Amino acid sequence: MKNLVKVERARLDLTQAQLADTLGVSRQTIHAIEKNKFNPSVILALKMAKLFSLTVEELFIIDEE
Amino acid sequence: MKNLVKVERARLDLTQAQLADTLGVSRQTIHAIEKNKFNPSVILALKMAKLFSLTVEELFIIDEE
DNA sequence: TCATAATGTAAAGTTTTATTTACTATTAGT
DNA sequence: ACTAATAGTAAATAAAACTTTACATTATGA
């Protein structure tokens, strides 16, 4: 799975810390998601997608399987 | 948060066990999600939404905040 | 170049998702 | 009423998300 968090965050001109704050998670969580270290919860994914004005499907892309 | 898993599963006429199988998780996981015992991963949410021909946003609804 | 903000990384610890097993309750068919 | 399939529940465990702290690296700007 890949995601567009880093580019969307850049689009909004937010630092990892600012995004983390906005979403109520730690900066490390943002970093880990951007680096595909893990698979976030739906709630977090929904909040992120909403913030970026995208659907969850657009923001998080499952590659094959 | 609430979700439409139970009704969508009924629409496809699947048992919890069949759905679990299809998604590669345990029956208890399906049960827990239907009962809002927890907040699944995006990957699982994406797979479910795809199976039900819905978006993640349609299948999992965050109430308030 | 010096200072500072932002990002990368890593380890230890907590919390929550997910599995496994197992047993009970409910429903449907014969 | 009996049987079998399905669903509810619960507890113990494993695995993964997420937090906290801390420090190293890279970029930015005065």
Image (cartoon, coloured by chain):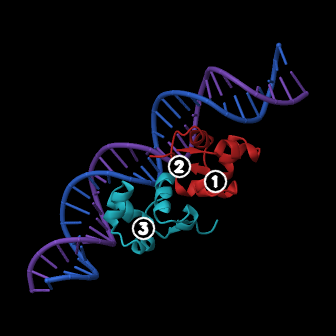
Chain colours: A red, B cyan, C blue, D purple
Residue type at mark 2 is: Pro
Mark 1 and 2 residues: CB-CB less than 8 Å, in contact?
A: yes
Q: Which residue is mark 2?
A: A40
Say few, some or many: other residues with alpha carbon within 10 Å of mark 3 (under 14 / 14 to 19 / 20 or more). Answer: some
**Residue B1 can be seen in this image:** no
CA gap between label 2 and label 3 equals: 19 Å
N-term-proximal mark, 1 vs 2: 2
Give the letter of the chain under mark 2. Answer: A
Q: Is residue A5 left or right of residue C5?
A: left
| Residue C17, x across and y down, in percent | 44, 54
| Residue A13, x across and y down, in percent | 77, 44
Q: Is residue B15 left or right of residue B57?
A: left
Q: Residue A47's image quarter?
A: bottom right
Residue located at (39% from left, 56% from top): B23
Say few, some or many: other residues with alpha carbon within 10 Å of mark 1 (under 14 / 14 to 19 / 20 or more). Answer: many
Checking the image for residue B34, the label placed there is 3
Element carrying mark 2: loop
CA gap between label 1 and label 3 equals: 23 Å
Check the image and report above or below for B17 versus D18: below
Residue type at mark 3 is: Glu
Compare residues A11 and B31 and report the one nearer the observer: A11
On the same chain, marks 1 and 3? The answer is no
Residue type at mark 1 is: Met
Q: Which residue is mark 1?
A: A48
Element carrying mark 3: helix
Check the image and report above or below for A22 versus D1: above
CA gap between label 1 and label 2 equals: 10 Å
Check the image and report above or below for B38 versus A19: below
| Residue A14, x across and y down, in percent | 74, 44
Element carrying mark 1: helix
